[in-house]
Image (tube, rainbow, N blue to C red):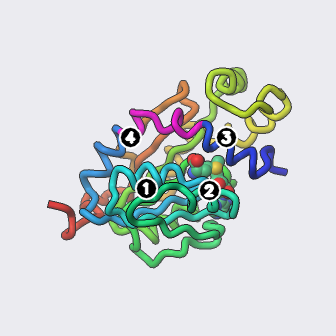
């Protein structure tokens, strides 16, 4: 059984969004991702939850065509009701482990925020993301990296959380979900998927790790000929 009910997960994602996506995360986005995007990029977020990351992108890149995929109707409902000013995102309820509803090479950028750790076997999802990504496109993987139990439990004292986080049983159950792949494990998984890392950013004493990766040897930007400027 999942440790958190859908409504609890929603509250946690919304309450922690600002802390998780702090200035260093957006610096990496601006340094690594933005310079290689065309003027009107297409970008997809797998397990988009309440859509706040897509909304942040929408504010930075209003010309971007955005796609959000999630299994949860509750999350997608929140995402659909954000104050989108220009292009609304395409939000679809789907299980991306059964396939991403995008054509081959359909988008310039694919993100997975606090998503990939949920899968026992992440390689098929990475392969499917590569299929849907233009050659040279970036994969943005921001997730938990395993830390010792004592440090993990301290995390819930300092970061915003749910009132229920006072319950040690819940924190232990979440530990089992979040503390799976170490930083070295993620590197190994990416090497198995034929990916190389361009930038890593740690926050929360290394418990949160952003990894911006792409197909090993792919140096031509996904924007290619249609790159802005
Ligand atoms: C921990 S939340 C992260 C939400 C959002 N990315 C964020 O960082 O705020 C994980 C999300 O993945 C979604 N999810 C889980 N398995 C999925 C699957 N197989 N396909 C699509 N979405 C999935 C959940 O519904 C949930 O919204």
Cα–Cα gap, marks 2 and 4:
23 Å
Query: Which percent across, then down, holds residue 165?
Result: 77, 30
Look at discs 4 and 1 and give the one toward the viewer: 4
Quadrant containing ligand 1:
bottom right
| Horizontal side, residue 215 vs residue 113: left or right | left
Earlier residue among tags 3 and 4: 3
Cα–Cα gap, marks 2 and 3:
13 Å
Q: Which residue is mark 3?
A: 12
Earlier residue among tags 4 and 1: 4
Please tell me whether mark 2 sits on a helix, a strand or a loop.
Answer: helix
Q: Which residue is mark 2?
A: 78
Q: Is residue 208 above or below residue 150?
A: below
Please report contact status of discs 2 and 1: CB closer than 8 Å, yes or no.
Answer: no
Which residue appears farthest toward the bottom when viewing the image?
103
* Front-most of residues 100 and 63: 63
Please tell me whether mark 4 sits on a helix, a strand or a loop.
Answer: helix
Which quadrant is home to the C terminus?
bottom left
Query: CB at mark 4 closer than 8 A to ligand 1?
Result: no
């Amino acid at each position: 059984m999942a440790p958190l009910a859908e409504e609890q997960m929603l509250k946690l994602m919304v309450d922690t969004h600002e802390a998780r996506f702090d200035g260093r995360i957006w610096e990496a986005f601006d340094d690594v991702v933005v310079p290689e995007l065309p003027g009107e990029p297409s970008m997809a977020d797998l397990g988009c939850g309440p859509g706040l990351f897509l909304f942040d992108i929408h504010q930075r890149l209003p010309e971007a065509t955005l796609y959000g995929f999630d299994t949860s109707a509750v999350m997608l409902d929140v995402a659909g009701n954000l104050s989108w000013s220009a292009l609304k995102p395409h939000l679809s309820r789907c299980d991306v482990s059964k396939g991403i509803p995008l054509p081959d090479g359909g988008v310039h950028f694919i993100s997975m925020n606090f998503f990939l750790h949920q899968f026992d076997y992440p390689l098929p999802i990475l392969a499917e993301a590569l299929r849907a990504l233009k050659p040279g496109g970036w994969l943005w993987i921001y997730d938990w990296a395993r830390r010792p139990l004592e440090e993990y439990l301290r995390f819930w004292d300092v970061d915003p959380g749910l009132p229920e986080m006072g319950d040690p049983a819940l924190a232990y159950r979440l530990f089992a979900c979040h503390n799976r792949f170490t930083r070295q494990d993620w590197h190994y998984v990416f090497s198995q998927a034929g990916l190389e890392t361009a930038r890593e950013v740690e926050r929360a004493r290394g418990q949160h790790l952003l990894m911006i990766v792409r197909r090993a040897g792919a140096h031509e930007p996904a924007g290619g000929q249609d790159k802005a400027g």
